[in-house]
Each structure stands twice: as structure tokens, then as C-alpha cells.
Image: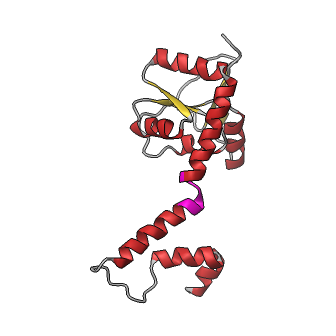
Amino acid sequence: GGDVSLVLMGTKLMPLPDDPRVRFAGTLSDSERFHALAAATVVVVPSPYESLSLLALEAFAVGTPVLANARSEVLVEHCQRSQAGLYYANRWEFIEALKFLTGNRSLADAMGRNGKAYVDRHYRWNTILSKYERMFARLKKQSDYYNFRQRTFGTFLQDVRRQGLSATLAERR
């Protein structure tokens, strides 16, 4: 029961049922995709072969919980660490998890907030840059890593932060 629609985005790889609740949006621009993800009650991530899952992270970033395939260890870990998604191992679990998320708006909203916080904590640009800077600083200190007074990727990232990408690139031409 309930008033739920399935909206598919991307490239159509198979015939779709002739059902008014199944809609195909096609390939969307980045802006349209983010608006669609934000408007969704839940984003289903069915692939069992995810290595990072940009779709799940994008859904988290806009505050939409995910329903993920439990055969993907990466998706299960994202759901557990973020507390922003559920995962299913079979058809029955999928149906029950979908009913649960669509029937508990306050819980879905809380999961959406958890997803935003998770992305902010682990995947924002400044966070990623800081992780790389720390890694390169550690590498630079290794005795077998000769780079005394030479520019490194770490110093490149520091310069980008300090003076911007255009100025950093211009300085290195």
C-alpha cells in the first residue's frame, strides 16, 4: 500500500513495466540529479559491486536516507557508520525496509541528518585535502624519501589552500 513511486535515473538498460508508479527520468544534469535525490523519500542503491558508492554519498549529502544491497560490504559499512541507511539481503527485507522508511518520516528525516553529518565529517573537499596533506607530510619525513627542498604534491595542496588553484598553477608554469 501507500503512495510510492519509483523514479529511475541514468541510462535505461532494460524494458520498464507499463505502470504509472514507475517513471524514467533519463540522464540528468548534476543540478537536476541533486534536486531529485533531495526530493526523494529514500534512494535505493541496488548494486552489489560498489567500491565507494558515489550515489549513496550524494544521497547522504542532500539528507536522503538510502536502502542498499547487503551484498555490497562497502554499502553496508556506509549504512552502519553513518546511521543513514538500511540494507536488504532479499526481496522480503527490501519490501519491509522500504515500508519502514516510507512509513516513518521522522526516522527518515533523522537518518537524512545523520547522512549529511557523515559526509561533512568524512568526504568534504577540505577533509579530503587534509587527509592527503597529512599523508604526504608523513611520507616526506621518511628517511628513504629524498625530497629536501623540493616541491611535493603536499606542498601543492597547501599552496592551493593558501592562494587558490589559479595562482598556484600560474606560479608553477
Residue 127 seen by the camera: yes
Q: Is residue 135 left or right of residue 42?
A: left
The answer to which of 68 and 141 lies nearer the viewer is 141
Q: Position of residue 51 (x, y in %)?
A: 42, 45
Magenta residues, as a range? 122-127
Q: Is residue 17 magenta?
A: no
Q: Residue furthest top?
A: 1
Q: Residue at x 60, y 39 (%)?
A: 114
Q: Tell me the quadrant of the picture where the C terminus can be found.
A: bottom right
Q: Is residue 18 left or right of residue 87?
A: right
Residue 64 seen by the camera: no
Q: Residue at x 54, y 32 (%)?
A: 85
Q: Is residue 89 left or right of residue 100?
A: left
Q: Tell me the quadrant of the picture where the N terminus can be found.
A: top right
Q: Position of residue 164 (x, y in %)?
A: 65, 76
Q: Position of residue 146 (x, y in %)?
A: 32, 84
Quarter holding residue 141:
bottom left
Dominant secondary structure (helix, strand or loop) of the stretch shown in magenta? helix
Q: Position of residue 107 (x, y in %)?
A: 64, 27
Quarter holding residue 170:
bottom right
Q: Residue at x 46, y 34 (%)?
A: 47
Q: Is residue 122 above or below residue 14?
A: below
